[in-house]
Image (cartoon, helix red, strand yellow):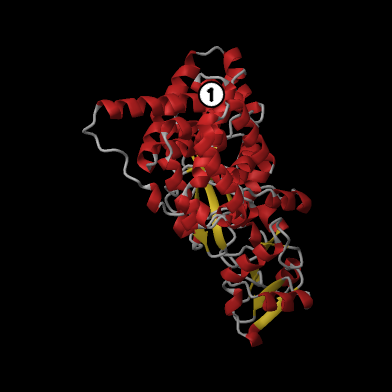
Amino acid sequence: MDETPLPLTELLATDLDDGFTELVRTQAGTVRSVLLRLSGSARDADDLGQETFLRAYSALRDYSPERRGQLQPRAWLLTIAANVWRNHVRTLSRRPGVADGIEVTAIELPDGSPGPEQLALDGARRARLVAALSGLPDHHRLPVVLRHIGELSYQEVAGILDCPVGTVKAQVSRGLAALRAEPGLAADRGTHGAAGAAGAAGAKTATARTAHEAARTERKEATG
Amino acid sequence: MRLPDELDTLREAAPAGFAARVLDRVGVPAHRYDCYVRADSPVGPLYVAHGRGAVTGAAATDWYADDRAFEDAYRARTRRSALSGVKPPPGLARALRGRDRTLRYEFGPLADEQRAVLLATRAVPFGQLRPAAWLAREAGLPGLAPETVLAAVRANPVPVLVPAHRLCTDDGLPADCGLPPDFERRLREWEGVDAERVERFVRAGARFLGSGTTRIFCYPTCAHARRITARHEVPFTSADEASAAGFRGCLSCRPAVV
């Protein structure tokens, strides 16, 4: 669910340019972060982010004011972003000569003033997490990124991926399990060693599990 | 730290200029929004917002939890969006060094009289202090109540650049201009206001200082008054008293209608 205050959708309905400016101001960070974790390269994230907002604007221009007023801005933008990214991947696979995005994320410069929560995660560990995330297969990475970086609900992710909610929950929990199983991440996960091992075991036996069970594990971990 | 929380930390603000590039490419005209930059000043890092060729706001970065908090406060005050930009307005660095020649200001939704007072504030020279009555007179509103002047100065949306910290009370003590006290004190210190000397004149009840050699009187912080040697200092409690003693007002600091 969006916590965006109501005025944003009202603005979009009454004054498109002003509303769109606010939309970019409040959502640019999320959209770009999602694309950055999907593509793994800052340059691609910039380009795809531009593309996403360009499409969003032309779509909004054709919407009626009522329809603009009923938008869920973040979910709607991330739907566009996911489509833009999938198109980008398809284009890359059609043109194998084009080099893949360079791994800029590995040498990401920390921004000028990391917030308190960013300080809590030291640079080396963050880099390992980023690397592990970009190592996930697409069908796990997309749901994990949309759910945990895009902060969408399972229903919204299911809407974007066009599959049942249970499937999304399973994909997200398997994706997280795979991340926990990463040796680089499990190493300094002191108290979480047990959880990590359980996650890894879960990943191995995931094929034998029903989606329902996986979802239950996810819920348990979410409350833990 | 749990994994989902760690993933949360991967959500970061877009780089400076990203939002403005998006709007530029989409075709939203640049006059529909403002940009802000972080600039280093003698009193620590500041946010400086600007748009349509004028500076529209300033604040110390540590008054806000993060960039988003500043943007939200800016939006609430001006009803305009501020996006993080990369280019400071031309002349900003020089203005922050105390030589503000070229900057234009746009104060947002303020009453006309407040606007006039804030523009008059810009006429107080670096490192000097002026009382509310002087500001009202310079703003062309001599009848304005001191409370109104003080309220206007406290509503200053561009602290540091528009020098509201150069306001003093009627007896000459630096006035509280609505900024954190420590911040005001550092600003005045950096500008070289000699607090000890100011207090000495206030204790003596001297609101004006004349020179026995030139027969001219000034505000005590005026550059000319600071050059008067101790044995030629002639303190006055009012402009009338100085006039009666045959002194005329200084043409730089204009202590009375000259």
Horizontal and vertical percent position of residue A224: 69, 44
Q: Is residue B51 left or right of residue B230?
A: left
* Residue at the image position 57 percent from the left and 69 percent from the top: B191
- Which chain contains the residue that carries disc 1? A
Q: In this view of the protein, can residue B158 be seen by the observer?
A: no
Horizontal and vertical percent position of residue A47: 37, 34
Please tell me which residue lies in front, A117 or B239: A117
Q: Residues within 10 Å of mark 1 (few under 14, many from 20)?
A: few
* Residue at the image position 68 percent from the left and 52 percent from the top: B153
The disc labelled 1 sits on which kind of residue?
Trp
Q: Is residue A185 left or right of residue A69?
A: left
* Residue at the image position 59 percent from the left and 24 percent from the top: A166
* Residue at the image position 59 percent from the left and 68 percent from the top: B127
Horizontal and vertical percent position of residue B82: 54, 40
Q: Which residue is mark 1?
A: A76
Horizontal and vertical percent position of residue B177: 70, 57
Quarter containing the N terminus of chain A: top right
Please tell me which residue lies in front, A34 or B215: A34
Query: Taking A87 as reference, is B56 above or below it?
Result: below
